[in-house]
Amino acid sequence: MHEAPGYHDQKQQVLARLRRIEGQVRGLQRLVEEEIYCIDVLTQVAATTKALQGVGLQLLQEHLGHCVAGAAAGGDTERTTELVQEATKAVERLLRA
């Protein structure tokens, strides 16, 4: 059995944010269906992207505070190094998005 993820205590908050984002995406679909002005749609795309980035940063913070810090506190240098490298790659993906 695996350890609970770092966001375990915030799971309901994360899910609520994702549901709001899902609503934003449905709103975007509606805007396109209604042939709303391009700039207005792009503004909403930017807002949705920002919301997703916020969730990503929250998950990254939880990972660093729970998984990485836990491995470091436990003295597991090899695991800490692995988790830091994993987090670095996650940051790289977030920055490219």
Image: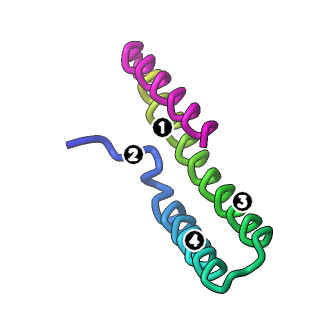
Residue 84's x, y, as percent?
Answer: 49, 23
Query: Which disc is residue 5 wearing?
Result: 2
Label 2, label 3: how far apart the Cα atoms are: 29 Å
* Lower sequence index among marks 4 and 2: 2
Whether the residues at callouts 1 and 2 have beta carbons within 8 Å, the answer is yes
Quadrant housing the C terminus: top right
Q: Nearer the viewer, residue 40 or 6?
A: 40
Residue 57 picture quarter: top right
Instruction: Tell us which disc is closer to us: 4 or 2.
Output: 4
Q: Disc 1 on helix, strand or loop?
A: helix
Whether the residues at callouts 2 and 3 have beta carbons within 8 Å, the answer is no
Residue topped by disc 3: 46
Query: Which disc is residue 25 wearing?
Result: 4
Q: Nearer the viewer, residue 8 or 36?
A: 36
In magenta, the rendered stretch is: 74-97
* Lower sequence index among marks 2 and 3: 2
Residue 82 picture quarter: top left
Q: Disc 3 on helix, strand or loop?
A: helix
Neighbours of disc 1 within 10 Å: few (<14), some (14-19), many (20+) = some
